[in-house]
Image (cartoon, grey):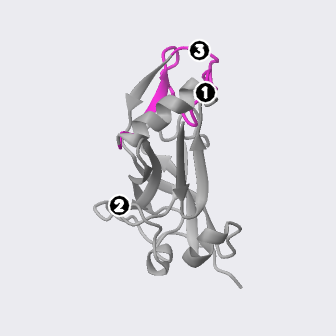
Amino acid sequence: MITANYLGMPLELDDTLDNENREYFACCAKHEFRLQRCCNCHLFRYPPQTACPWCTDLKADWVPVEGKGTVHSYTEVHHAIQPAFKQHVPYLILLVELDTQSGKPTATEGLRVIGNLTTADGTLAPKEQVARVGIGTRMRMVFTDVAPGLALPQWTIDEAADSKGEAWRYRPD
């Protein structure tokens, strides 16, 4: 069992965790981003699960995946429910569509991974960085170490990526 504290919120990976999630978090702990790839249809899947959501095959391999992509959607949190997060508002929760398998299995379904916006060292991003991110922003994965054997996959702005115009952001009234 691994117990940790992330920004004042208790986290626990216990013995009841299924094999798929145990393997996923073991890779993240080593700062390796690996996802299941179906042995039948060869599509990646996230989150980890027992069967392929596309063809229902049970066999999968854990394959290294480049943690780079584009913001597909986001939520900007201004009223944190978790007390420890209040000092970090506003913060972003991002849904990033990975370059790997983009547009597959269909044009509207891609391989999308959720995580917080952080700085390159894995700490929640400051307000100035939050203001730079919107739909279309290029991101790269980083890991936040929260305990021995536990690291969370997060997102930071990919400063090395070519920008293709301004990212779209919701404009409040």
Q: Secondary structure at mark 1?
A: loop
Cα gap from disc 3 to disc 2, whole angstroms: 35 Å
Name the residue tied to disc 2: 158
Q: Secondary structure at mark 2?
A: loop
Q: Position of residue 14 (x, y in %)?
A: 59, 35
Q: Is residue 169 above or below residue 31?
A: below
- Seen at 39% across and 66% down, the residue is 119
Q: Position of residue 126 (x, y in %)?
A: 46, 76
Direction from residue 32 to residue 54 in the image, left or right: right
Instruction: Answer few, some or many: residues within 10 Å of disc 1's Cα (few below 14, many 20 plus, some between 14 and 19).
Output: few
Q: Say what amino acid the circle numbered 2 marks.
A: Asp
Which region of the structure is painted magenta? 31-59
Q: Position of residue 92 (x, y in %)?
A: 56, 66
Q: Is residue 50 magenta?
A: yes
Name the residue tied to disc 3: 58
Q: Position of residue 28 (x, y in %)?
A: 42, 41
Mark 1–mark 3 CB contact (< 8 Å): no
Q: Say what amino acid the circle numbered 1 marks.
A: Asp
